[in-house]
Amino acid sequence: MPFLLKRLISAVSLVFGTSIIVFLMLSPAFDNIAFNVLGENASPEQAAALNAELGLDRPVLVQYASWLVSAFTGDLGESLFSTQTVMQALSVRMPVTVALVIIVTLLSGVLGFAIGVAAAVTRGWVDRTLQFVATLGDALPAFIIALFLVTLFAIQLGWFPATGYTAPGSDIGGWVRTMTLPVVALTIVAVAGVAQQVRSSMIQTLRLDYVRTLRSRGLSETRVVVAHVLRNASTTGLTALAVQVVGILGGAVVIEQIFALPGLGSLAIEASSRTDVDVVLGAVLAYVVIVVIVNLLVDLIVAWLNPKVRLA
């Protein structure tokens, strides 16, 4: 319980700290909001009146305190350029990004662990292939891979749509087709990093004395690797996977633009270009909450696998 409580306090502190940093970073753009809403031909008097109406004429910290109080009640404000509230916009856009992140994270975890274990155990062509793919994944960003996938599988072969999104509730098959290329583009980049960390941790663990002791007792190699070595080495892989989630979210912003997916990334970019402050804040907080939840889950799993983490 103390371990979980500490992690929850850390998570809340991170969300709070991120919100104030983002708010302060956006504050220089507050002066342009009135002209973005009213148009460049608006008079200074009209701009001043709108700023007063929106509360933008108050000190920045006072504005942040007002926003924070409203946020605690579930009110993240309203868009300045539509009739939607921020919560409504997030409720529409978040499922797309969350589905993308969950699928990529699960695939990266499963494939990364499988490839990493195979590379560490065999140390043959699988290991050499992993090193090549890991180098390729580090060298090529997700959007380059996405453009290649679109050119080959969407434009030339016509197997998948190049852009667009189909909701799973209307057509599950269409949803799978629209999500396949974005998922593959992000997974290729993420899986290499996870597999590399799992491989290194497995190799180090296989050299420990207790592994030789287990083998000398007649345990099968499969049981030694799966039941003992992998359990100890998995904490490193899970930590790497949690780090990759941040990269997956960052890559998703660009990927959503390339494939015209209506997710948080496209929402944040649209809101940033119009200085729609409340929407930008809401999108950033949504990203932070996703990262916090993933890291909290990983911490709990790691603590379950390694009791030393709980004691620390």
Image (cartoon, helix red, strand yellow):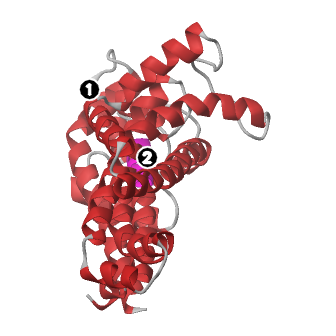
In the image, is 148 to the left or to the right of 14? Answer: right
Seen in the picture, residue 134 relative to 273 is either above or below; the reply is: below
Residue 143 appearing in the image: yes
Amino acid type, residue under disc 2 in the picture: Ala
Task: State the image quarter where residue 285 is shown.
Answer: bottom left
* Residue 101 position within the rendered picture, expressed as x and y whole percent measured from the top left: 50, 47
Residue 268 appearing in the image: no
Seen in the picture, residue 83 relative to 208 is either above or below; the reply is: above
| Near-viewer residue (47 or 235) | 235
In the image, is 85 to the left or to the right of 275? Answer: right
| Near-viewer residue (23 or 133) | 133
The mark nearer the N terminus, 1 or 2, is 1
Secondary structure of the residue carrying tag 2 is: helix
The residue located at (39%, 68%) in the rendering is 234
- In the rendered structure, find residue 44 and report the number of the disc placed on it: 1
The residue located at (55%, 28%) in the rendering is 181
The residue located at (31%, 79%) in the rendering is 212
* Residue 271 position within the rendered picture, expressed as x and y whole percent measured from the top left: 41, 34
* Residue 112 position within the rendered picture, expressed as x and y whole percent measured from the top left: 43, 51
Foreground: disc 1 or disc 2: 2
Seen in the picture, residue 104 relative to 6 is either above or below; the reply is: above
Pick out the residue farthest to the top: 156
Q: Which residues are magenta?
A: 278-287
Secondary structure of the residue carrying tag 1 is: helix
Q: In the rendered image, which residue does mark 2 sit on?
A: 283
